[in-house]
Image: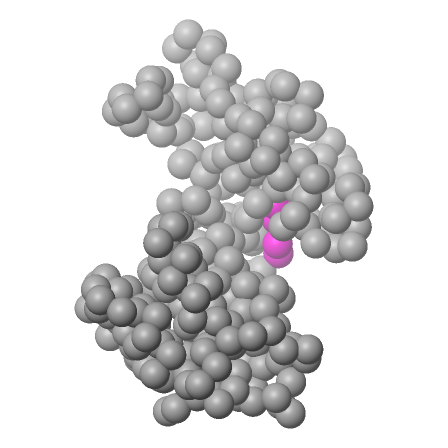
Amino acid sequence: MGGVKKSTALVLREINGPLTIEKVILDQLRPDEAKVDIHASGICHTDLPFVEVGSYVNDFQIGDKVLLSFNHCTYCTTCKEPDVAYCDNFMALNFGGSRPDGTRPLYTSTDKKPCNSNFFGQSSFMRTATVHHSTMVKVPQETDLGLCAPLGCGLQTGAGCVFNTLHVGVGNSIVIFGVGTVGLAAVMAAKMAGASTIIASDLSEARIRLAMELGATQTVSATVPDIVGEVRKVCSPLGVRFAIDETGNAQVIENMLAMLAPRRSKRGSTKDRDDCQG
C-alpha cells in the first residue's frame, strides 16, 4: 500500500486557463500526513478511504473511511481552546499552496514542476491526495461517501454558525440571507435548535421553496424594495434576534444590521423568547 507514488489530478497551468487531467507525482509522505483515495468531492471539500498513513498518525488505520475538511496547525492557542476554525495559521495552511515549510506534496509527471496544492488542506480534485492528519474525521465503514461531501465545508459552516457562534435557542428568531448549501444548512440547524421564526431570503424562488421544505417558517424575496421593513413586520417591534449572511454582498449585510433587535444578555435562553409573528 505504501508504494503509491503517482495520481491523476485536474491541473490548472495558467490563470483562466482550462483544467487538464494530468498524471502527478506524489512527494514522499511526511510523518504527520496521510494518502487518501478520493471517492467524492464538492467544490471545496471531499471524503475518502486511506491508502497510507505517516508515522505520527495514530488515530487512523489504512482502509478507514474519512471525511476531509480544513487544515489547522493543532498547536496554536486557538487550536488548543479548541477553536480550530480560527487557527492562527489558517490562511497559510489552507490557501498557501504548499506545506508550512514551503515544499509541495506533488509534481507534474511530464515536466516535474511543483504544483500548488493543499487547497483547503487537501486539493481534492485528484484520485489520491496527500493531506495533513488534522483535516481528517473518521466515519463509519458503511457510510456512503458520496453523501458526505458537503459536510466538510458547506454544511458545517452554516450549521456551525447557528450552533456554535450564535447559539440559537428555543423560541429565538433568525433571518438567513442566501439559501444555497451554506444557508440551507443554517435553516436546518435553526430548526433543530428550536427557533420559532426562521426567515429565508434569496433571489432564487426555487431556493426559497426548498428553504421552506427544510424548516423556514417565513420567506422574504431579496427583490422587495424595503427588505428591512418586511423582516421587521415579521419580528416586531424590536427586530430579528439573529441574522446570518451567506451572500458576501455589502448592501445585504448593511440591511441585515439594520433589522437586528437590540442585544440581549442571555444567548439561546428559553426565558427570553423573541416577540415575532408567525
Q: Is residue 120 left or right of residue 52?
A: left
Viewer can see residue 20? no
Question: Looking at this view, is 267 or 184 the one in front?
Answer: 267
Quarter of the figure with the C terminus: bottom left
Across the whole image, how many numbered discs are drawn on residues?
Answer: 0
| Membership of 135 in magenta stretch | yes
The quarter of the picture where residue 160 lies is bottom right
Question: Looking at this view, is 105 or 216 the one in front?
Answer: 216
Q: Is residue 49 left or right of residue 256?
A: right
Question: Looking at this view, is 176 or 98 the one in front?
Answer: 176
Name the colouring of the figure: one colour
Residue drawn at the location 38% of the way across and 50% of the way down:
250
The correct choice, above or below, for 25 with respect to 233 in the image is above
Residue drawn at the location 40% of the way across and 28% of the way down:
8
Residue drawn at the location 43% of the way across and 14% of the way down:
109
Question: Looking at this view, is 160 or 141 the one in front?
Answer: 160
The correct choice, above or below, for 167 with respect to 105 in the image is below
Dominant secondary structure (helix, strand or loop) of the stretch shown in magenta? strand
Q: Tell me which segment is drawn in magenta.
A: 134-138
| Membership of 256 in magenta stretch | no
Residue 220 percent coordinates (x, y): 28, 74
Residue 59 percent coordinates (x, y): 73, 50
Residue 180 percent coordinates (x, y): 34, 60
The correct choice, above or below, for 257 with respect to 232 in the image is above
Viewer can see residue 44? yes
Residue drawn at the location 60% of the way across and 73% of the way down:
263
Quarter of the figure with the N terminus: top right
Q: Is residue 79 left or right of residue 185?
A: right
Residue 15 percent coordinates (x, y): 33, 21
